[in-house]
Image: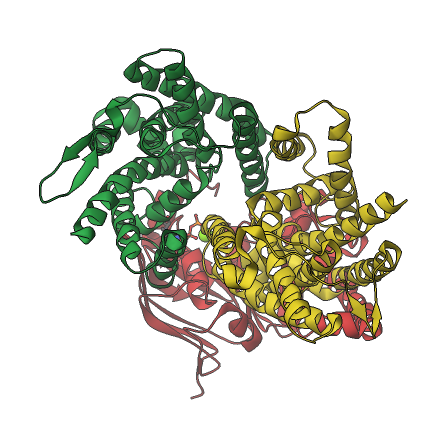
Chain colours: A green, B red, C yellow
Amino acid sequence: MVALQLFVNGIVTGCALGVVAISFSLIYSTLRIFHVAHAGIYTMGGYVAYSLVMHGVPDILALLLAMVAAAMAGAAIQVLLYQRLAARKGTHLVVLIASLGLLAVIQNLLAAIYSANILQFPGAWSGEIVNLGDGIRLTKVQFLTVIVCILAYIGMMLFAHRTLLGKRIRAVASNPFLAEITRLRPQAVYVYVIAIASAVVCLPGVLVPYDLGLQPYGGVTPLLTATIAMIAGGVGSITGAFLLSVAISVVQNLSLLVMPGEWSIGVTFFVFVIFMLFRPTGLFAAR
Amino acid sequence: MSAPYLHVSGINKRFGGLQALNDCSFTIREGAITCLVGPNGAGKTTIFNAITGFLRPDSGQVEFRGRRISGLSPQTIVAAGIARSFQNLRLFAEISALDNVLVGMRGQFGEEPLSALFRPLKTAHAQAARRITGREILDQVGLLAQADTLVRNLSYGEQKLLTIARLLATKADLLLLDEPASGLSAGALAALMALLRRLQSAGKTLLVVEHNTRVVQQIADDVLFLHQGHLMAQGTPEAIMADPALAEIYFGGALQDHGP
Amino acid sequence: MDFLLSYLVLAEIYVLLGLSTNLLVGIVGIFSVSQAAVFGVGAYIVAFFLMNTSVSFLPALAVAAICCVVLNIVVTLPSLRVSGDYFVVTSFGIQLLATAVFTNWTGGTGGANGLPGIPPPDVFGIQLASNAQLALLTSIMAGLGCIAFWLLMRAPFGRLLRAIREDELAVAAAGKNVLRAKVSAAALAGAFAGVSGGLYATFLSFIDPSSFDLDASILLLTMVVVGGARTLAGSILGPFVLLALPQLLSLVEIPTTIAAAARQLVYGLLLIVFMLFRPQGLLGEKL
Ligand SMILES: Nc1ncnc2c1ncn2[C@@H]1O[C@H](COP(=O)(O)OP(=O)(O)OP(=O)(O)O)[C@@H](O)[C@H]1O
Ligand SMILES: [Mg+2]
């Protein structure tokens, strides 16, 4: 019984993580930047929504506005930071360090404004219980998280394969040089990519804190888990990233049966090491 | 009959849907300059990678002086006596020309931390000797005056010569040169060809990827013609150049990218 | 006076740690955000021996150094197998895992409350209690560290590492064992970090996980970046500048509740600004 409940909890967190992984993967496979600051965008989205809700903005609207804000922040990061670093021929290491610096700035700005304490969203609806039978219970917001995140996954699949922009993004991702000379304008595509990914990551960025509360430094562990899922799933595979996120979360939750929650980062990491040893290209690697 | 100097047999390598090397086999004579020609994408660089351990072929094997070397690591293959250059040079741009050569030298005292830390005097002493050898090698390729220049400040022609100096530092006997002549001015080209000849008389064996047919005619003892990953023909430069079928393949595919 | 002495001691401890980070990040070009974890392991090991056994300081320091050598090799090994970006994941993972261990393994580390009452170091039977004596000890240690770094960098070993940073494949083509050189560098970096951790524990006489978390790793990276990558002068300057910074910040009116966040924010900003405008730091070479 407990195991089943943990399994279901794993699905909930996994779907949320899956969206983090998809959005990160979109950036990583197109811009080729290991965008660590994405963890900051994820956290920022939650705080923006929180502020709006506290000022009486309806929840749905707050979520949408947070997505818009995150998209703008993401675009700004690309134009003001990454593009400039690229123009200065910054090495990979330089870009990584800058991204890490940006993560520190975002997190600590949030901590300075909102304090480092955990904040809870107001609103009674989110805590209401949905009974799935057999004593398996989810809060309403958990239930919503699963639905929204699965929709986001489907949406991203359709976007990547059916829309013109999605196809352009995949073209740039597969060969930036060719895209440059065929006038697909990778630089513009990069801005779109990071904006879209930033908006999408707000879905879990807002919904998860609705359930568990907000914390300025809370983005690093989810991002780490998501990147592990992305790698284990095979870089570039949307489905791989999503499924592996769910799988890792489920394993993590089930591990609670045998060890305390503080060590779940160890479990995640263990998955990563196993993959690195036995299948470094991931499960769903292209080709 | 003794075993051939370098013997490549039945190498296959597939990249996804592309058969980059297709049952590729050939041999090389000791002391000769062999030119490897073929249109762009023929698999010339790929066969270099397969010989030098940078790429594991799907099948086939390489023997050097009768010893099987396929499957060994790049550094073991260098130690066995084969060194290669890269089409895109891959020099260390932020250190001096002399330091680039020194990196290539084998068995240096002070190359692991413990000897560097606890035997600093011996390290310094050994280094002084190495630097002299390094300068001699630079002199051989005509770069002595640039010994202390940072590589990124060297001209393209000088950088190409430096890649050869770095190979010489390894003391390998068989040198694989990937397009050493491309992009050189007429003067630099003449100097390069003279250098290759000097290396040959000094006892080195050379396998050279080369597009320029005039260069091939002047320096090659043997020519290998590679097409779609397969060795189409092997012979003297005259014989290969005279074959109209090969010329058609070669110029049909290569004219847009390279001048004649 | 006493204040200046403790500033000196702390800065010298961080010089040793900065040398360790500079070796990995600057010289070999491995992005690492887990050096603080290794530093912490050194600190906890020395604390354990001095508090629970009759082992004296120097042997304890030696044990710590050896453990950190092994640990840093294990931590760095993935970077030898997998490409750069995957190592970012490993590095974050190790850091978070270490923080989890420091915080939750209450029996060994005192948990979040930390370990108070670590005795001062004793050298050849002499207890070094005053700050002046400690300053002498750390000066000698930091001096030895600097000499070692200098010797290593001017030897063929240093040249080999620089070459590896620029082009691993070309180093392999030159017939060198890249793996062995990287493992050696990781081992050295571990020894430096372990020794500085031991000095840190005995100097402060109190350690807790917050000195060895992700923020600490970011501070460390900032020291190397600001001082300047790949040079001895840069590794020395960085810690002195960065440790003076909180004093400067305290001149500005900042509420104490957000002082820590403000400090980290400044570190993040420094990382970004230096990467954009001066990737070689104050006294270093281009990253
Ligand atoms: N690592 C790789 N992955 C996928 N395809 C590759 C890889 N390396 C080479 N190829 C492909 O294999 C084919 C042969 O490449 P190779 O570089 O050996 O040609 P080449 O004869 O050296 O050509 P060039 O004259 O342009 O240097 C090319 O079509 C190339 O695109
Ligand atoms: Mg080639």
Q: How many marks?
A: 0
Residue furthest toward the right? C1
Image coordinates for residue B43, horizontal then vertical, percent: 38, 56
Q: Is residue A108 above or below residue C200?
A: above
Q: Residue furthest left?
A: A133
Which picture quadrant has residue A10? top left
- Looking at the image, is C271 positioned above or below residue C136? above
Q: Residue at x 33, y 63 (%)?
A: A278
Q: Is residue C262 above or below residue B97?
A: above
Where is residue B80, by image quadrant?
bottom right
Residue B83 location (% of width, % of height)? 56, 67
Of A152 and B114, nearer the camera is A152
Quadrant of res A96 = top right
Could you tell me residue A15's position as x and y percent? Answer: 25, 38
In this view of the protein, can residue C30 be seen by the observer? no
> Percent x, y for residue A40?
47, 32
